[in-house]
Image (tube, rainbow, N blue to C red):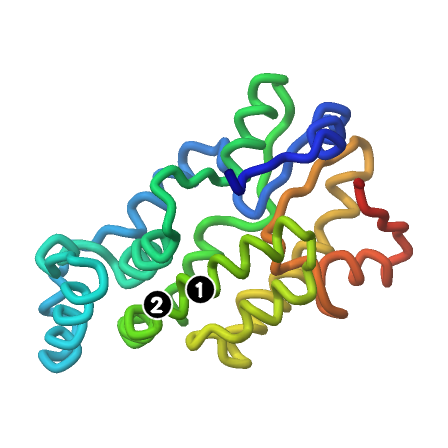
Amino acid sequence: DDYFLNENVSQALKNSEALFTEINFGNMEEMLLMQKSVQTDIPLKERISEKKYKKLESLLKEKLNTEIISLEKLSEAGIASMIMMKSFSCDNIKMYEIELLQKAMSEKKQLGGLETVKEQLKIMEDHLNIDACIKMLEELKSSEDSNRKMVELYKAQNIDELLQLLNSSSYMNEKAYHEFVVNRNNNWVTKMPELMKNKSVFFAVGAAHLGSKDGVLDLLRKNGYTVEALN
């Protein structure tokens, strides 16, 4: 019930020659790398201390009714992603990137990414470690409330409060914020002019990358572009 795609947004995609998302979901090599990144040959029990293992085991059982043995071959980023997905009280989760990708592919548009999977994984590996996973589980109930608030803010298109909500996450310290958000925004805006030089491009990135003076919208304005909302 929460999913929506504004008709003007659909029309803007239809009128564009290319779709560029954060990573190129149409590149099979990139997708294989992403898939492999959530798996590891080294069991979780051998990667972390006994104390953290027992803490994680207890929290998984208590919060998610999940046995830790099922996560032994998941990477830390894979475990964090699983916790994030389960923090949404919805069985049928839709990803906007995939919905847009399917529309773009059906219309045979060029596909691309603003960064590589390898670049994205580096940031995740640096910040989504076991300590972050434990904090996510400890805060799971409040996370569910935050996710409901996030959905409402998204539907209201309140990008500034969305960013503030993201910053309230336990793992989002100042360094993480700069690497997850600020640095990536600047990298993307540097690439965008060349990408749209000779064709119309539909760029789709997470809502948290849009607001504030460090957001993609203001960075584009600073570079002389006129940015208007599609109402």
Residue type, numbered disc 2: Lys
Element marked by disc 2: helix
Residue beneath the point at 37% across and 65% down: 125
Spatial CA distance of label 1 from label 2 is 7 Å
Residue under the image location 53 percent in, 31 percent down:
99
Lateral position of residue 143 relative to residue 130, left or right? right
Mark 1 lies on residue: 145
In the picture, the disc for residue 73 is: none
Residue occupying image coordinates x 65% and y 66%: 161
Q: Position of residue 9 (x, y in %)?
A: 72, 34
* Residue 24 makes an appearance in the image: no
Q: Mark 2 = which residue?
A: 141
Residue toward you, 120 or 129: 129
Check the image and report above or below for 109 versus 5. above
Circle 1 SS class? helix
Question: Is residue 108 shown above or below 192?
Answer: above
Neighbour class for label 1 at 10 Å: few (<14), some, many (≥20)? Answer: few
The C terminus appears in which quarter of the rendering? top right
Q: Position of residue 75 (x, y in %)?
A: 25, 58
Q: Position of residue 142 (x, y in %)?
A: 40, 70
**Is residue 173 toward the left or the right of residue 217 in the image?**
left
Proximity of marks 1 and 2: CB atoms separated by less than 8 Å: yes
- The answer to whether residue 37 is left or right of residue 171 is left
Q: Classify residue 170 by image quadrant.
A: bottom left
